[in-house]
Amino acid sequence: MTAEPRPSAPAISAHQVDVVLSGVPIVRHAGFEIGVGQTVAVTGNNGSGKTTLMRALLGLAPHRGTIELFGTELSRFRDWRRIGYVPQRSTILVQQATAREVVASGRLGLRRPLWPAGASDRQAVTDALLRVGMADRAQAPFVRLSGGQQQRVLIARALAGTADLMVWDEPLAGVDLSTQTVLAEILAGLRRTGTTVVMVLHEPGPFEPLIDRAITLADGRVVADGPFQPALGGHEVHELPHSHFHETGLEVI
């Protein structure tokens, strides 16, 4: 029998989490809790394990230890509609899918399998594209968009799903100032609605006044947990090798 979630449980709870990939320890004994409604930056130097930790929290990387989402142990968690994941652009495989198709995939968890999209799904996709300023590029192939435009589309996909927890991996990396401003406005709106947001960041940019807390990694370990300090973040270009998360189930709605 599946255990009932604890009342007022944290959005994320991690205890003694280890991740070993190809025999190499990437995350070591990580532990923390992230309360509902918090905006948290995960910082650290290149190769410190930030992206791998985020993937482990979502079940996309094998781990040892205990991870809970909204009070439910990760292996028993099924309510994935509550999670909005925005990976690094380099991990997305969408071939010739349009921007609208990518955003539409964020609605798949909100209806029964194989059921066609309804009016509410189509409207949610349209609203999300408008919110990120990409309505005029809805039919453009995702792979032909600029880096900043791709990031906006991936954020829109998460917004279309109306998630309670957003996990963003380097949302500001390689995007122009106008996109950074748009994303900061979106983050401010998510804070107002009580959405939990966890972001891998190496520089705060316009997010700085919106961040409640920073969890800093070094050599896979949590070495600091408190007020955001950009100087601790370092500059990340590539992390240690890890498997890619391939997007599937795209459809036009």
Image (tube, grey):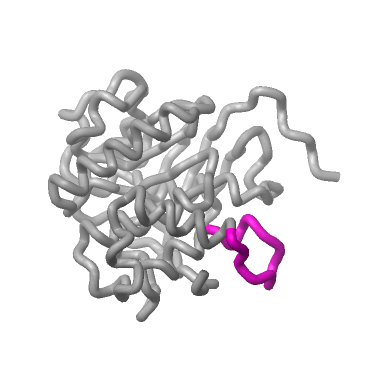
| Residue under the point 34% across and 46% down | 49
Q: Residue furthest bottom?
A: 96
Image height check: is 204 above or below 102?
above
Question: What is the span of residues highlighted in magenta in the rendered image?
Answer: 107-119
Locate residue 246, reporting x and y percent.
Answer: 45, 69
Quadrant containing the N terminus in the rendered view: top right
**Left or right of 70: which side holds 244?**
left
Is 128 in front, or is 223? Answer: 128
Count numbered badges in the picture.
0
Q: Is residue 4 visible?
A: yes
Image height check: is 111 above or below 143?
above
Locate residue 211, reporting x and y percent.
Answer: 32, 27
| Residue under the point 28% across and 61% down | 150
| Residue under the point 39% across and 76% down | 97
**Left or right of 230: which side holds 99?**
right
Is 3 in front, or is 121? Answer: 121
Is 116 part of what is drawn in magenta? yes
- Magenta region, main secondary structure: loop
Quarter of the image where one finds residue 189 = top left
Locate residue 106, reporting x and y percent.
Answer: 51, 58
| Residue under the point 32% across and 42% down | 200
Q: Is residue 25 visible?
A: no
**Left or right of 206: which side holds 99?**
right
Quarter of the image where one finds residue 112 = bottom right
Is 66 in front, or is 153? Answer: 153
